[in-house]
């Protein structure tokens, strides 16, 4: 029905050259680095935000878990900035592609789980059986816990993809509906326009929240395993 | 005071019009030369608009506006085709024709 609704999700290529690489690299331009103690406003704002996030997220971890700080902070910055840039008109959002989110989720989850198995084997295996289960239920519960473990990276990736894609689709649809309704009934078009504004505000929030949730869950898996 | 600056080292605004093609051909088109050009351009923009004592939102907004513009150029072809379809079906996008007919 809507071939042109999904054209904004096609990977951009130009004359056979992958433009998508440039688009993925673009957010790094917006985060300059600096060696100074006192910086310009842009860098100071970013450093303040980064300190806030790292204190909030990494304080629950042990020393071993805190070695992951750089990785997790880069992750939340990347996903947050990519999602926010995707809200600009005509832009392409790399996080709508499941391939990319799987590429982020699977290695991070696997790293946390393998760290746990290597360093605290008994404790990691003990996660498969909650405390206090009746003996007859044990085999079934172990199977269920294994399945829930292996579903974690899939859930991470699909959650991010679905949320961002759904938000963009809703904006397209409601925007198109507003345009179509202006010639039929201006009052309804006005109501739809207000809905569009509210939706855009929601999308800004969702962009940042999804980044936070992704990173938080990875840090949770890490906490279980260090 | 009659020293002649060689053509290679002149900046663009000092080159005379007749010398322009040879000036362009003398530029450094090696990969490191192109990378150097991008780096110099980046630092020129950064030091002028962002790395100042009282930087404003304009420094970031100009970059985002250029990003939007480049994405528009990239998707111009599809947009113009879907506009043609829209005008062909009387002012609505072709997938919404059914909806509009039902509402009227």
Image (cartoon, grey):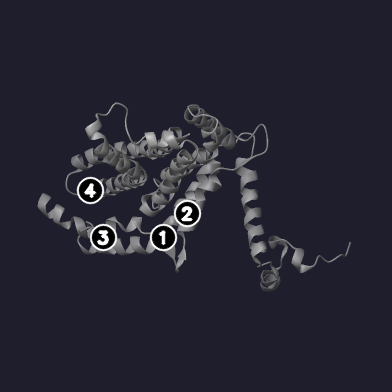
| Residue that label 1 marks | A12
What numbered label is drawn on residue A23? 2
For the residues labelled 1 and 4, the Cα–Cα distance comes to 26 Å
In the image, taking residue A112 as reference, residue B35 lies left or right, namely: right
What numbered label is drawn on residue A3? 3
Name which of mark 2 and mark 3 comes first in the sequence. Answer: 3
Name which of mark 2 and mark 1 comes first in the sequence. Answer: 1
Name which of mark 1 and mark 3 comes first in the sequence. Answer: 3
| Residue at image point 47% right, 66% down | A17
Closer mark to the observer between disc 4 and disc 2: 2
What numbered label is drawn on residue A177? 4
Name which of mark 3 and mark 4 comes first in the sequence. Answer: 3
Same chain for labels 2 and 3? Say yes or no.
Answer: yes
Residue A220 appears in the rendering? no
Secondary structure under tag 2 reads: helix
**Chain for numbered disc 2:** A
For the residues labelled 2 and 1, the Cα–Cα distance comes to 9 Å
Closer mark to the observer between disc 3 and disc 4: 3
Same chain for labels 1 and 3? Say yes or no.
Answer: yes
Name which of mark 4 and mark 2 comes first in the sequence. Answer: 2
For the residues labelled 1 and 3, the Cα–Cα distance comes to 16 Å
**Are circles 2 and 3 on residues that touch, CB within 8 Å?**
no
Q: Position of residue A38 (x, y in %)?
A: 66, 32
Identify whether A7 is placed above or below A73.
Answer: below
In the image, taking residue A47 as reference, residue A3 lies left or right, namely: left
In the image, taking residue B90 as reference, residue A40 lies left or right, namely: right
């Amino acid at each position: 029905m809507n071939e042109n609704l999904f054209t904004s999700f096609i990977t951009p290529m130009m004359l056979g050259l992958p433009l998508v690489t440039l688009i993925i690299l673009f957010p790094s331009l917006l985060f300059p680095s600096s060696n100074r103690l006192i910086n310009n406003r842009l860098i100071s704002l970013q450093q303040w935000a980064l300190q806030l996030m790292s204190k909030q997220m990494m304080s629950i971890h042990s020393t071993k878990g805190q070695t992951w700080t750089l990785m997790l902070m880069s992750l939340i910055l990347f996903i947050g900035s990519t999602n926010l840039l995707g809200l600009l008109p005509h832009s392409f959002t790399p996080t709508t592609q499941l391939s990319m989110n799987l590429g982020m989720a699977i290695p991070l989850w696997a790293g946390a789980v393998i760290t746990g198995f290597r360093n605290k084997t008994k404790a990691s295996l003990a996660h498969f059986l909650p405390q206090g289960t009746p003996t007859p239920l044990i085999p079934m519960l172990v199977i269920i816990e294994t399945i829930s473990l292996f579903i974690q990276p899939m859930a991470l990736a699909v959650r991010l993809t679905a949320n961002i894609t759904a938000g963009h689709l809703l904006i397209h649809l409601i925007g198109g509906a507003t345009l179509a309704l202006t010639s039929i009934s201006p009052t309804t078009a006005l109501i739809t326009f207000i809905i569009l504004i509210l939706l855009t505000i929601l999308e800004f929030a969702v962009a940042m929240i999804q980044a936070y949730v992704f990173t938080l869950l990875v840090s949770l898996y890490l906490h279980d395993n260090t | 005071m009659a020293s002649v600056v060689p053509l290679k080292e002149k900046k663009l605004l000092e080159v005379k019009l007749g010398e322009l093609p040879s000036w362009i051909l003398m530029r450094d088109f090696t990969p490191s030369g192109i990378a150097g050009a991008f780096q110099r351009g980046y630092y020129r923009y950064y030091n002028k608009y962002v790395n100042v004592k009282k930087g404003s939102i304009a420094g970031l907004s100009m970059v985002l506006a250029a990003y939007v513009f480049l994405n528009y150029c990239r998707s111009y072809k599809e947009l113009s085709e879907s506009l043609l379809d829209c005008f062909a079906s009387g002012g609505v996008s072709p997938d919404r024709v059914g909806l509009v007919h039902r509402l009227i």
